[in-house]
């Protein structure tokens, strides 16, 4: 018996030493569960209601949520979420683009809707319509004592080159957006931009990722740019569209 007690005591001492070195995060390893989806179109919006009812994502980041605000507001109240989204009245046509829903129990320490300065051009219309500068939702959240910076990402179309269809005209707007996201992540201890980067992974690594960050892609242009976090990505079936829906579990690195 004394040998068993001695062995157990030794293991407890080793664990205590490990926790002292690695810190309290090693003990609890909290994670933040984020869902992202492009919800352009009524069918996609209805699927978000099902998602909110069946799952308990900590955060939902929804892009192209232009006409979804009334539904999201109602469902947020029903399923226990806080909605953060710009409005057309205050921010113009692009205001409602990115909607962020945060589950009750995850504390919102700060929320900013940062407006870029450079206009950009839509890729699919001819003549191409000029768009107001992108809005970037930046949240500081706390779950289980751990603080995360979360950015709802929807970069201007075309990537760093500015886009073929737009004859490269979006390059300045994209660079401004990417630089802002990179600066936000670089200044944070743990942060992630989640959503539609409108660029391939290699471009996000070069233009948006901070020096000590990482990029995880769920589709050709959708994914996570993170710093100070491990990213466990799960690709989901994307309904009726080109963009990949996914979940990302973020844990302190």
Image: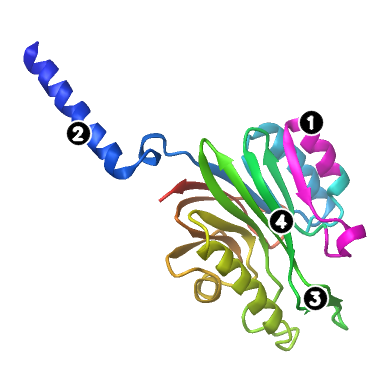
Point 76% across, 39% down: residue: 49
Q: Mark 1 packing: few (<14 Cα in 10 Å), some, or many (20+)?
A: few
Q: Position of residue 200 (x, y in %)?
A: 56, 72
The residue that mark 2 highlights is: 14
Residue 122: which numbered mark, if any? 3
Q: SS class of the residue under badge 1? A: helix
Name the front one of labels 4 and 3.
Answer: 4
Q: Position of residue 147 (x, y in %)?
A: 53, 46
Point 87% across, 54% down: residue: 67
The residue that mark 1 highlights is: 78
Q: Marks 3 and 2, how far apart in space?
A: 58 Å
User: On the rendered image, what quadrant is the N terminus found in?
Assistant: top left
Label 4 or label 1, whichever comes before in sequence order: 1
Label 3 or label 2, whichever comes before in sequence order: 2
Name the front one of labels 2 and 1.
Answer: 2
Q: Marks 4 and 1, how far apart in space?
A: 25 Å
Q: Image quarter for residue 55?
A: top right
Q: Mark 4 packing: few (<14 Cα in 10 Å), some, or many (20+)?
A: few
Q: SS class of the residue under badge 3? A: loop
Q: Marks 3 and 1, how far apart in space?
A: 35 Å
Q: Marks 4 and 2, how far apart in space?
A: 43 Å
Label 4 or label 2, whichever comes before in sequence order: 2
Q: Is residue 80 left or right of residue 16?
A: right
User: Range of the magenta residues?
Assistant: 71-95
Residue 112: which numbered mark, if any? 4
Residue contact between numbered discs 2 and 1, judged by CB atoms under 8 Å:
no
Residue contact between numbered discs 4 and 3, judged by CB atoms under 8 Å:
no
Q: Marks 4 and 3, how far apart in space?
A: 25 Å
């Amino acid at each position: 018996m004394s040998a068993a007690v001695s062995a157990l005591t030794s293991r407890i001492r080793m664990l205590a030493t490990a926790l002292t070195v690695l810190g309290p995060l090693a003990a609890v390893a909290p994670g933040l569960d984020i869902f992202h989806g492009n919800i352009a179109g009524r069918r996609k919006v209805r699927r978000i209601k099902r998602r909110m009812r069946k799952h308990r994502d900590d955060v939902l980041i929804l892009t192209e949520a232009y006409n979804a605000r009334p539904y999201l507001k109602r469902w947020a109240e029903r399923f226990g979420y806080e909605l953060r989204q710009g409005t057309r009245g205050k921010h113009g046509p692009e205001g409602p683009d990115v909607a962020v829903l945060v589950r009750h129990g995850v504390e919102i320490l700060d929320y900013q809707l940062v407006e870029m300065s450079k206009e950009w051009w839509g890729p699919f219309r001819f003549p191409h319509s000029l768009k107001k500068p992108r809005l970037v939702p930046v949240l500081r959240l706390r779950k289980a004592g751990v603080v995360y910076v979360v950015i709802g990402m929807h970069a201007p179309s075309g990537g760093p080159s500015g886009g073929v269809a737009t004859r490269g005209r979006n390059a300045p707007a994209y660079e401004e957006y990417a630089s802002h996201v990179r600066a936000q992540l670089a200044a944070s201890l743990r942060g992630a931009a989640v959503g539609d980067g409108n660029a391939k992974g290699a471009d996000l690594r070069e233009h948006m990722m901070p020096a000590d960050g990482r990029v995880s892609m769920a589709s050709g242009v959708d994914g996570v740019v993170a710093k100070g976090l491990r990213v466990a990505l799960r690709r989901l079936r994307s309904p009726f569209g080109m963009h990949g829906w996914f979940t990302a579990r973020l844990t302190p690195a």
